[in-house]
Amino acid sequence: MNTYKENQEEFVSIEVITKDRKGLVYEITGIISELNIAIPNHKARVYNNKNKGMVSDFKVVVKAESHRHIETLIHRLNKIKGVISVNR
């Protein structure tokens, strides 16, 4: 787990792997925005997985107010249609 703190805020690296589809990045960033969590850094790529087809790998560093905030985010990300995994 990649986590560090600055003034009671947590910076956490999260990786969302899901089946690729139109609007996916919008949905992921929308969830983060709804929770009022900042995104200091992100990276996304799509690749062909021979077992799963086209897969999106979205890596993001988020800045949240608490560990509980991060847990809520991970819970919401896991509900995205086609999600394969959400990792810290």
Image (spheres, grey):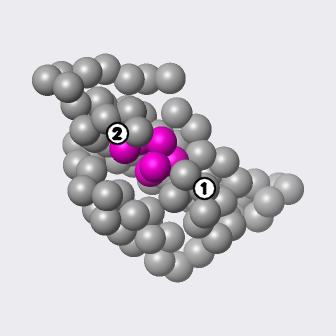
Q: Residue at x 41, y 39 (%)?
A: 68
Q: Which residues, given as a range, are shown in magenta? A: 69-74
Instruction: Say what secondary structure mark 1 lies in.
Output: loop
Residue at x 25%, y 21% (from the top left corner): 5
Residue at 48% in and 42% down: 71
Nearer to me, 65 or 88: 65
Q: Position of residue 23 (x, y in %)?
A: 47, 77
- In this rendering, the answer to whether 61 lies above or below 5 is below
Mark 2 — residue?
61
Please tell me how crowded label 2 is: few (under 14), some (14-19), or many (20+) other residues with Cα within 10 Å.
many
Q: Is residue 2 above or below residue 14?
A: above
* Secondary structure that dominates the magenta span: helix
Give the farthest residue toward the right. Answer: 51
Q: Residue at x 34, y 39 (%)?
A: 61
Q: Is 1 on the left-hand or right-hand side of 38? A: right
> Is there any visible trace of residue 45 in the rendered image?
no
- Give the label on residue 78, or none: 1
Identify residue type, mark 1.
Answer: Asn
Locate residue 72, reporting x and y percent.
46, 49
- In the structure shown, which secondary structural element does the residue marked by tag 2 occupy? strand
Q: Residues within 10 Å of mark 1 (few under 14, many from 20)?
A: some
Task: Give the camera-side residue of 83 and 54.
Answer: 83
Task: Calculate the distance from the C-alpha at mark 2 to the C-alpha at mark 1.
Answer: 17 Å
Residue 73 among magenta residues: yes
Residue 28 belongs to the span the image colors magenta = no
Image height check: is 30 above or below 9?
Answer: below
**View extreme (bottom): residue:** 22
Label 2 vs label 1, nearer the camera: 1
Image quadrant in which you'd find residue 9: top left
